[in-house]
Image (spheres, coloured by chain):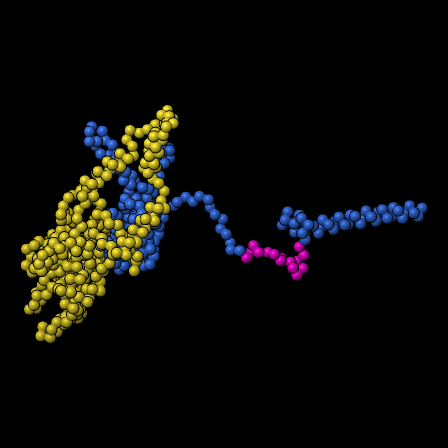
Chain colours: A yellow, B blue
Amino acid sequence: MAAPVRRVLLCPLRRILTQIPCSGVASSGCRQLSVGLRVPAVQKPNDVVLESPSPWRLLGAVFVQRLAVISRDRSPIEKDFAELLKQTELERSLLADHELRLLEDAERVSRKQEEDYDSDEDSGQDIVTAQDLEDTWDQKLRQFKPAQRLTGSIQKQLLNSEADKKADRTCLERCLEDSLVLLVKEKIGSEDVWLLPQVQWENGETLRETAERALTTLTGNSIKATFLGNAPCGVYKYKFPKDVRTESCVGAKVFFFKALLGSGDIAPNKKGGHVWVSKTELQDYLKPQYLEQVGRFMVDL
Amino acid sequence: MNPLLTKTLLARNEKVLQQTVSVLRLAVSNPHPVLGCVLQSSERQYRSMPTHGIGRYKYLLPKEVPKKKKEKLQVKAIKTGTDTEYGVLNVQVSGHDMTIVEHYSQYVHNLCNRLKIKVDESYALPTKCTEVMLLQEQGTKMFADAVLSTHERIVQLSSLSSKLAPVFLEVLLRNQPEGVQLSIKEHTEADFYARFKARPELEELIAQIN
């Protein structure tokens, strides 16, 4: 596994610059991702005349993720180690210009107090001493209030009852340190099933276009997602129950495509219901075999 | 008569001997006129000697190509992508905190090495400093409040396969630290020339010619 980068407990830079005093997350949005890649043009399949149509129905599904907005809290060991590193770095570093100025000013003051002080010898003195600058900066820092980190622990305190927790799962602003996946409730056969937004493949289009179509039809046109590449990331194959099976379709194969959420959210008045869940909450919604296949490509670093 | 004769004979013999000796010396001391001044000293090479050539070693060393001092950077033809592979990509990491930016770019480089993605180059663009000027509270003068410096590091990849690209991208995005902007672009000639300094005299001369 690649070694994790040293994480810094800073709020995202734009928050510091704009100084929004807010209790919630004002513009959580998602991190800016600019992928200026010209993805190789999707090749249209030539008119393939299938001699014997395969008995499997093909479906394209999309796995939309909102990536984590804040980094996770540090574990106690990580905190201790970070403190230790900071300490050693401070002790080994050289003095900065500002610190040198502070020392010089202190020395000048002590020289003034001596009896044999000659004011002519003293070199030019500044009107604004380094100490004054530090005081003004201290004042400014006290006035600044960073936005609150709504991590999982604080969320649990804010949410009161179980019902609230369930209903709140449609909100995009929860669990800022985990990534959330979109799940949609569909009616398959006779029962309602929670699954990733999927749509049947039509002749003449590539599977990735099917996935894009799934995203736009099942969620309305409000979500903007960037697809990562043309290749699917996972497959789920299942056979229909015996009474539904015919000669031409034995079962279905679902191909999953990964996408990252850019902006936008689903309109709340969707019929079936949609949910944004993290990896641990997926078990409550997905069927075990489906979950197993999805878990194979869902990365949770 | 006899002693005179013998003396002259002796003298003549000596002269002849000296001449022959000197000729021999000349002949011996210059057996290989091709080698020139190498053997001007008193070394003599006898090829029939069993120790001939003992101490020769330069023929065992690998051939060294003479180093050129200054190479003019030639614009290499930038590879374009095929259907299954991307061409030359620039992964650009930028931010204000130098340690984080450098660590992240090193992480990207190491990840590429692990995943066997070929890394062409890994370089840094010059730092850009932006001064934040604020209006003074009393008065209309602006004074410099802070200096923000933007650091940029670029890792250049080539032949990233399209199967690996989504996985690679996702790993990068998940491990992106706060305060760092990541952008992936295709490499162009403009990017290549952006690294060079402007040469005003050259441009003046070219303008004069045209």
Direction from residue A226 to residue A108 in the image, left or right: right
Q: Give the residues in magenta.
A: B45-60
Question: Can see residue A213?
Answer: no
Report the residue at 11% width, 75% height from top.
Answer: A242
In x, y percent, where is residue A201? 14, 63
B14 in magenta: no
In x, y percent, where is residue A219? 10, 56
In x, y percent, where is residue B48? 67, 60
Q: Is residue A98 above or below residue A1?
A: above
Report the residue at 22% width, 34% height from top.
Answer: B134
Q: Quadrant of the N terminus of chain A?
A: bottom left
Q: Residue furthest front?
A: A115
Direction from residue A211 to residue A106 in the image, left or right: right
Q: Nearer the viewer, residue A236 or A86?
A: A86
Determine which quarter of the picture holds residue A119: top left
Our reading of the magenta stretch's main secondary structure is loop
Q: Nearer the viewer, residue A76 or B109?
A: A76
Q: Quadrant of the C terminus of chain A?
A: bottom left
Question: Can see residue A275?
Answer: yes
Q: Nearer the viewer, residue B121 or A117?
A: A117
Determine which quarter of the picture holds residue A111: top left
Q: Nearer the viewer, residue A58 or A177?
A: A177
Q: Is residue A116 above or below residue A277?
A: above
Report the residue at 59% width, 56% height from top.
Answer: B56
Q: Residue furthest right?
A: B1
Direction from residue B85 to residue A281 in the image, left or right: left
Direction from residue A47 to residue A133 in the image, left or right: right
Report the residue at 26% width, 35% height from top.
Answer: A133
